């Protein structure tokens, strides 16, 4: 090693002066070691990347092979031909799993007057009797099919009733459930067209199609419930100024007040009134420091005169999340929260939402999920 890295001297001439630069053997060894180490780390990193890519490709190929094996129809056909009893047992086990997974559905969900859901019990029983008589070995399969239809219709009735409760609650709060559902059904959606089928011919049994529509309506309306202001935006019960016309505190003239004012100590937390996405954080003329949250369906809540922010634009918040603190910024005579509810940019009275929504929504969600609470009280 000493022969490889002898002490070296370099001569440099500049403006008539000669300088000597000496690089010791030790310094050369350190530089060489650093270079080798860097090359070694690079080589190891490349090896790890290559191995990861190899494993990922191997896993992908293995998965494709397993999927191809599962998708091979010949194996399933052979099972049907060789041991119909085993296939029947497998299907029965799957059906029992589905029924167990939906055990939360009340047992008394039956067809009521005025509902459009079919009741295939008699038809299914006739089918079981005929199939059992003509093809005895397929009788158990016919019984499983009857259980499937009964489960589909039970799920449909359950979804319809939950959707009806949600729609009634939305109406009680002065909103239109049809408009809300239409906006939720078409907002921010896309993707390739993949039609559903419930038979080998590619068709979809009307009973299965009805279930899909009922579940979609239930989901849209219950998501709509989450977007309705339902949590008090501050732990302050004193409302110093209500919605409507009032005497302006600065000019003394009659003026429109488009929200509710909650008097509170500077720095007290402010809460999101409903689930939504923060669309604005910053100063607004007259409002001071302001946060705005879009809840979908044209609903927006505004929180003004803040002292501090605790939310960022684009952030998704739940009902009860802290989004800021009470202050007196903007056109304000003292620390308080100015709270607005706007529908399609038009201010509406927030009081009915805050007073009625908790009880109305609790009733609508009865037996399904709990009403959101202030997170600080949980």
Image: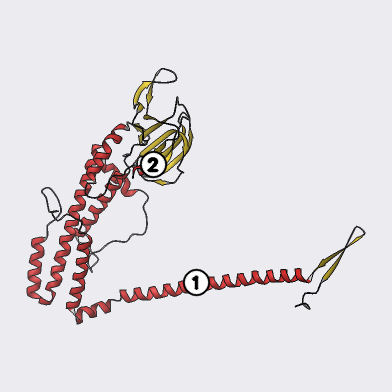
Number of other residues with Cα within 10 Å of mark 2, as a class: few under 14, some 14 to 19, many 20 or more: many
Q: What colour scheme does the image use? A: secondary structure
Q: Residue 13 appears at what percent x and percent y? A: 89, 62
Q: Residue 68 appears at what percent x and percent y? A: 34, 75
**Can you see residue 335?**
yes
Quarter assignment of residue 87: bottom left
* Secondary structure found at label 2: strand
Quarter assignment of residue 253: top left
Quarter assignment of residue 7: bottom right
> How many angstroms separate mark 2 from mark 1 (CA)?
43 Å
Q: Are marks 2 and 1 in contact (CB under 8 Å)?
A: no
Q: Determine which residue is flagged by label 2.
A: 294
**In this picture, residue 198 sits left or right of residue 64:** left
* Secondary structure found at label 1: helix
**In this picture, residue 272 sits left or right of residue 209:** right
**Can you see residue 175?**
no
Q: Residue at x 21, y 63 (%)?
A: 100
In the picture, which quadrant includes the N terminus?
bottom right
Q: Is residue 199 above or below residue 72?
A: above
Between 135 and 222, the residue placed more toward the observer is: 222
Q: Residue 362 appears at what percent x and percent y? A: 24, 43
Between 48 and 321, the residue placed more toward the observer is: 321
Q: Residue 235 appears at what percent x and percent y? A: 36, 35
Q: Determine which residue is flagged by label 1.
A: 53
Between 282 and 205, the residue placed more toward the observer is: 282
């Amino acid at each position: 090693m000493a022969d490889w890295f002898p002490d070296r001297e370099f001569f440099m001439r500049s403006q008539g002066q000669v300088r000597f630069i000496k690089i010791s053997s030790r310094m050369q060894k350190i530089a060489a070691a650093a270079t080798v180490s860097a090359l070694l780390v690079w080589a190891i990193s490349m090896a790890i990347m290559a191995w990861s890519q190899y494993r990922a490709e191997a896993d992908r190929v293995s998965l494709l092979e397993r999927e191809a094996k599962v998708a091979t129809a010949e194996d399933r056909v052979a099972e049907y031909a060789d041991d119909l009893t085993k296939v029947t047992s497998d299907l029965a086990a799957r059906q029992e799993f589905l029924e167990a997974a939906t055990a939360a559905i009340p047992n008394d969900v039956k067809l009521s007057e005025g509902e459009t859901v079919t009741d295939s019990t008699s038809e299914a029983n006739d089918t079981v009797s005929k199939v059992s008589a003509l093809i005895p070995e397929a009788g158990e399969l016919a019984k499983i099919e009857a259980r499937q239809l009964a489960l589909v219709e039970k799920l449909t009735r359950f979804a319809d009733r939950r959707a009806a409760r949600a729609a009634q609650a939305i109406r009680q709060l002065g909103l239109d459930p049809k408009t809300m559902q239409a906006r939720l059904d078409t907002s921010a959606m896309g993707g390739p067209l993949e039609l559903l089928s419930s038979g080998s011919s590619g068709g979809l049994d009307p009973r299965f199609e009805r279930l899909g529509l009922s579940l979609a309506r239930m989901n849209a309306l219950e998501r709509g419930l989450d977007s309705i202001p339902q949590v008090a935006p501050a732990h302050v019960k004193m409302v110093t100024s209500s919605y409507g016309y009032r005497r302006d505190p600065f000019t003394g003239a009659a003026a429109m007040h488009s929200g509710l004012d909650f008097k509170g100590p500077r720095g007290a937390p402010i809460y999101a009134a409903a689930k939504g996405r923060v669309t604005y954080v910053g100063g607004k003329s007259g409002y001071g420091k302001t946060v705005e949250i879009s809840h979908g369906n044209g609903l927006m809540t505004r929180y003004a005169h803040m002292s501090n922010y605790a939310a960022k634009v684009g952030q998704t918040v739940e009902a009860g999340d802290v989004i800021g603190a009470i202050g007196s910024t903007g056109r304000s005579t003292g620390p308080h929260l100015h709270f607005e509810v706007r529908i399609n940019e038009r201010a509406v009275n927030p009081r009915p939402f805050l007073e009625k929504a908790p009880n109305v929504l609790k009733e609508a969600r009865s037996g399904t999920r709990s009403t959101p609470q202030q997170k600080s009280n949980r």
